[in-house]
Image: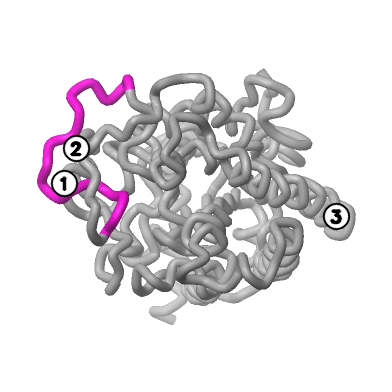
Amino acid sequence: MACYVTIILSIVLYLVVNLVEGAPEVPCYFIFGDSLLDNGNNNDLDTAARANYPPYGVDFPDGPTGRFTNGRNIADFLAEHLDFNHYIPSFASATGDEILEGVNYASGSAGIRNDTGSHLGYRIYLGKQLENHKVTISRIADLLGNTTLAKNHLNKCLYIVGIGSNDYINNFLMPDVYQSSHLYSPTQYATLLIQQYSQQLKELYSDGARKIALFGLPQIGCIPDQLNQHSTIFCVDSTNKAVQLFNKNLKALVDDLNTNFSDAKFIYINMYSISSAIAITLLNNPCCQISKTMPEGQCIPGKSPCLIRATHFFYDNFHPTEIGNNIATSRAYRALLPSDSYPMDIRHLVRANNLYYDDQ
């Protein structure tokens, strides 16, 4: 009896808080991906891919939290667009009934492939993130009373997945460390990644996801790391062409998933197009002082970053500054150009099949 009273009180409290504070556009929001979305899951892992030290977080209210930027990341800005009054907690820190509003599973250096990023140390690859989500589902079932109620709740949530960059940066583009570029052509590798990704997304659907935004890969050939490796000030065309193969297949996968799962809606966020400004500006010099040892390409611990961070698109050799994250998220949520998203943007995705909103 006491157990049922606790469950009922948890649900009532959850509903009351949302009614008083104003409900977000979706009741819950789950995040899967890599360092562009990680908000602390790597902090206690044995890995070089961590950002829980200054100058990371210099503009974030809580300081260094594990976000790979100076302030807010894409997951944070999207939470604001969705009218959440807080940022979604990391899986490493989420407790109690706060998981009813979502969990962030993203992990720096993680990829679609399990081996991606392994030279940096431990990382929570996408398959493991899906396993962690099952743990969350079990906890939600305990809070709400049973698995059916948990799945009904999850059906209403927004899911975003932003992964695949490390499968290139920390795998295919490192021929001295990984065999992938020796075994596969760029076309074959893109196909292989999408095949594995497809199975992972189908698993996410089986676990209750019905509104899923898939972030394509940005212009990796324009990041400072690639410019340094190729000793150029121009974007690396071969890298961008490889990325475009992945994105083309991902967009086609969205069509396939929407055809095969008619009760769900998958969308594609064209980060390649959104990040195109990098290729025509001089804003891609990193803001912080870059380490030449592990973690190579990240900020040197304790060193002061540039003063005017709004004039830099990149914070380190891999990750955008807060302003870059803000621009990208704004266009993902509300498309500026028709090419920014397909077949709709996140704003329309979260409102799809909902009868309680006015499309303004």
Secondary structure state at the residue bearing disc 3: helix
Residue, far bottom:
1
Magenta-highlighted stretch: main secondary structure? loop
User: Magenta part of the protein: which range?
Assistant: 295-311
For the N terminus, the image quarter is: bottom left
Q: Alpha-carbon neighbours of circle 3 within 10 Å: few (<14), some, or many (≥20)?
A: few
Q: Alpha-carbon neighbours of circle 1 within 10 Å: few (<14), some, or many (≥20)?
A: some
Residue depicted at 23% across the width and 21% down the height: 308
Judge left or right: residue 260 versus residue 184: right
Residue under label 3: 256
Q: Amino acid at mark 3?
A: Asp
Compute the Cα span from label 1 to label 3.
43 Å
Q: Amino acid at mark 2?
A: Val
Tell me the tag on residue 143.
Answer: none
Secondary structure state at the residue bearing disc 2: loop
Q: Are marks 1 and 3 in contact (CB under 8 Å)?
A: no
Residue under label 1: 54
Q: Position of residue 39 (x, y in %)?
A: 35, 53
308 in the magenta segment: yes
Secondary structure state at the residue bearing disc 1: loop
Determine whether 202 is above or below 135 in the image: above
Q: Amino acid at mark 1?
A: Pro
Residue under label 2: 58
Residue 113 can be seen, yes or no: yes
Q: Give the quarter of the image for residue 134.
A: bottom right
For the C terminus, the image quarter is: top right
Q: Position of residue 71 (x, y in %)?
A: 29, 37
